[in-house]
Image: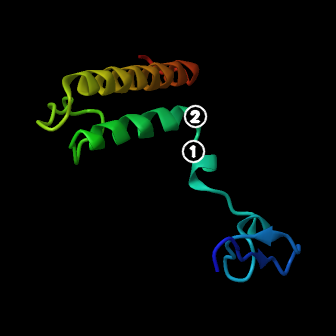
Amino acid sequence: MRGKRWWFCCPRCWTRCAVLYSSRRRRCYGSRCRSELTSPHDRLLLKAIKIRKRLGQTTGGVIVPFPERTRSMHHRTYLRLRAECTDLEQRFFRGEADRMRKMGMQV
């Protein structure tokens, strides 16, 4: 059936939805997506780790040295990703330092 799309109807609120979770849509359960539960500050760190994974790093997070360029990656792409990752990490750690200062900790 080309050109047609099937929809479910939530039995609780009768709203049209594409996916039902245990016979109700996600919002009727009151659950949220992981990205909605992550703070903007923490998303900086997750994005930096995602860039490092793209470059082949498997462990260590942001505390290990930045991974070397893979042979298949263009120099310009590597330098752009490295600069973006460095900026994200600096913004994250600056925010952590501010948060620690607010709690009265020595930085």
In the picture shown, does residue 48 fall above or below 104? below
For badge 1, the amino acid type reads: Thr
- Residue 31 location, x and y as percent? 69, 63
Q: Are marks 2 and 1 in contact (CB under 8 Å)?
A: no
Q: Which residue is mark 2?
A: 40
Q: Determine which quarter of the picture holds residue 45.
A: top left
Q: Nearer the viewer, residue 58 or 82?
A: 82
Residue 77, numbered label = none
For badge 2, the amino acid type reads: Pro
Residue occupying image coordinates x 38% and y 34%: 48
Residue occupying image coordinates x 39% and y 20%: 87
Residue occupying image coordinates x 30% and y 34%: 62
Query: What element does badge 1 sit on?
Result: loop
Residue 38, numbered label = 1
Q: Residue furthest right?
A: 13
Q: Residue furthest front?
A: 2
